Image (cartoon, grey):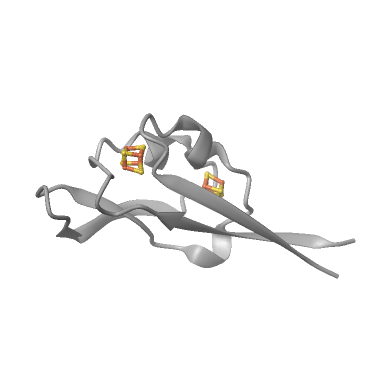
Amino acid sequence: MAKVKGVIVVDKERCKGCGVCISACPCNVLEFSPEVNGKGYNFITMAQPDACTGCASCGLICPDSCIVVYRQKFE
Ligand code: SF4
Ligand code: SF4
């Protein structure tokens, strides 16, 4: 059966660090970066990239559409 792996790209400068996407991820992939963006917000980063399934929950729930989700199938 094909396995699906996901990766996300976060628009760091637009992220306001609300954390909604962290709660929405069923695989505990996301966490706040220790770094801040130009507005002083801790933006989102993939703490456990290998756990991402590409489900897109994070991208759908982000109120500012800062996350783009990519999916890749492996045989
Ligand atoms: S695509 Fe799904 S599994 Fe991957 S980081 Fe977003 S919510 Fe988590
Ligand atoms: S939901 Fe969007 S704005 Fe909020 S922390 Fe996640 S990426 Fe940033």
Q: Identify the residue shown where x is 38% and y is 29%.
A: 63
**Outermost right residue:** 1
Q: Identify the residue shown where x is 19% and y is 51%.
A: 42
Residue 34 placement (x, y as % from top left): 18, 61
Q: Identify the residue shown where x is 50% and y is 64%.
A: 49
**Outermost bottom residue:** 75
In the rendered view, does 57 fall on the left or right side of 15? right
Q: Nearer the viewer, residue 15 or 25?
A: 15
In the rendered view, does 63 fall on the left or right side of 38? right
Residue 71 placement (x, y as % from top left): 67, 57
Please tell me in which quarter of the rendered image ligand 2 is found: top left
In the rendered view, does 9 fall on the left or right side of 40? right
Q: Nearer the viewer, residue 57 or 9?
A: 9
**Outermost left residue:** 40
Q: Check the picture and name the quadrant holding the C terminus.
A: bottom right
Residue 26 placement (x, y as % from top left): 54, 41
